[in-house]
Image (cartoon, coloured by chain):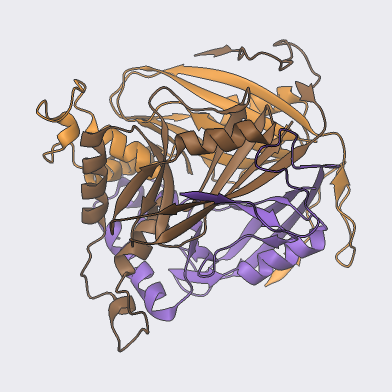
Chain colours: A orange, B brown, C purple
Amino acid sequence: MSEGQTQLAGVELIPENGSQPAAQGGFKMFNRIADWITSERMQVINVTDRINEIVRKSGIRDGLVHLQSLHTTTAIFINEWQDALLHDVKLFLDQIVCREHGWRHNDPQFSDCERKNADSHLRGMLMGQCLCLQVRNSAVLLGTWQSIILAEFDGPRSRSMSIQVSGI
Amino acid sequence: MSEGQTQLAGVELIPENGSQPAAQGGFKMFNRIADWITSERMQVINVTDRINEIVRKSGIRDGLVHLQSLHTTTAIFINEWQDALLHDVKLFLDQIVCREHGWRHNDPQFSDCERKNADSHLRGMLMGQCLCLQVRNSAVLLGTWQSIILAEFDGPRSRSMSIQVSGI
Amino acid sequence: MSEGQTQLAGVELIPENGSQPAAQGGFKMFNRIADWITSERMQVINVTDRINEIVRKSGIRDGLVHLQSLHTTTAIFINEWQDALLHDVKLFLDQIVCREHGWRHNDPQFSDCERKNADSHLRGMLMGQCLCLQVRNSAVLLGTWQSIILAEFDGPRSRSMSIQVSGI
């Protein structure tokens, strides 16, 4: 195990043996809603560039960016953006939640939902609609192979994501 | 794709081509512990109103609310609050993790746990005990169909959630 | 249901019927990268003490600590740290995503990935690479049985986690 100090221009970091906090400054916040139109029932969208553009616009250098999809039948998560893997991602999500399984949400006897989308709800619940990431040096902190993915589980629809950037 | 500017009273947002941050102000923080008594082994509880009440009390208008259940055999997540769907949620969680599967945590040869709750731990781990949401205009930001759900996987028990509201 | 006020030295909390925010103060931020060398293909590491040490060094008393593993084939989550249960955790993650399943990411016809690690990607996606926890009284807030676990799904490798502590 080893611990390194991050090297980022313009951020004062304390020495390993220091005791005062790294950076102080006026706390700022920036909010945006971004929308996407989806075209498939299950679809994955790479939103990394869009989020980075909003982070850059925010003028916030270091902090957090919180992403929240406003729909229960969607999800936001991280993975490598590679065609073959995205095929596997959709196959996995399709298999881990069966579309037909006697779900009550799809049964007119128990539910007034006409979309028959119990599977979409369960996929959205499993993967989550929120993602919080670090902002460093006016960009979203991501590893080399990490992309931010918005997943549609009940499209085609219009989908909104609320993006909040906060920090210094 | 299109990007809209959120319309929220009292929050200064910068124009699309602006460069200064949206809102600045004194950073504030508010902490609470909330408790629930559960009555079933697996149970879902709609905590949305309770969380909104705490956010309103905090006096914080815009920021984040972080929810953390303090127990490994519970979870916090988002879904639509509909009886038929909640039945499906419990069925799905029951099926994705078998109660009996030769789990070592339940085996006296390997474990001193007398609750035989390996399945509860695995469900809690899968769904997660933390949820972070945006606060906008003194309320939790949620889509029309999004409710905040506390799930009990090893009840009946007394359960505590730590709630932290921070922002401006 | 009952609601208690947290008892933490040095943090001003408002009375139940109050309206002013709990604590105000200069917002501070502290960033670190921590590294681990893993030794197994699937491995779990208890990083709780390491994170607590960084939180203590940050000088931040109350706020959030955000953990982000910078690799798609890893995850960060919470569970009890008990040998028998950790065996079950690995068994469960091994079973919920099959290693061989005709994944395209492992197929030279569709992918140039030579690590044949589609299963590792799917496990990392399912469990998530980010975890945000509360900081209270200069320590990570955790329930009695909650430990912070870094999971390796494609080791042995060198792995980095970015840790951001923010608050007052």
> What percent of the width, then of the height, locates residue B90?
25, 48
Q: Nearer the viewer, residue A130 or A88?
A: A130
Left or right: C123 in relation to C139:
left
The residue lying at 54 percent from left, 33 percent from top is B52
Give above or below for A66 relative to A58.
below
Give above or below for A167 relative to C151.
above
The residue lying at 70 percent from left, 31 percent from top is B59
Give above or below for C27 relative to B3.
below
Seen from this angle, which residue lies furthest bottom? B109
Q: Nearer the viewer, residue C134 or A53?
A: C134
Q: Nearer the viewer, residue C92 or B78?
A: B78
> What percent of the width, then of the height, locates residue C80?
47, 70
> What percent of the width, then of the height, locates residue C67?
62, 53
The residue lying at 62 percent from left, 20 percent from top is A32
Residue C113 seen in the figure: no
> What percent of the width, then of the height, locates residue A117?
23, 29
**In the rendered image, which quarter contains the C terminus of chain B?**
top right
Seen from this angle, which residue lies furthest front? C17
Give above or below for B13 relative to B124.
above
Count all numbered tags in the image, as a single digit: 0
* Snapshot quadrant of residue C26: top right
Residue C87 seen in the figure: yes
Left or right: A69 in relation to C26:
left
* Snapshot quadrant of residue C137: bottom right
Q: Nearer the viewer, residue B55 or A112?
A: B55
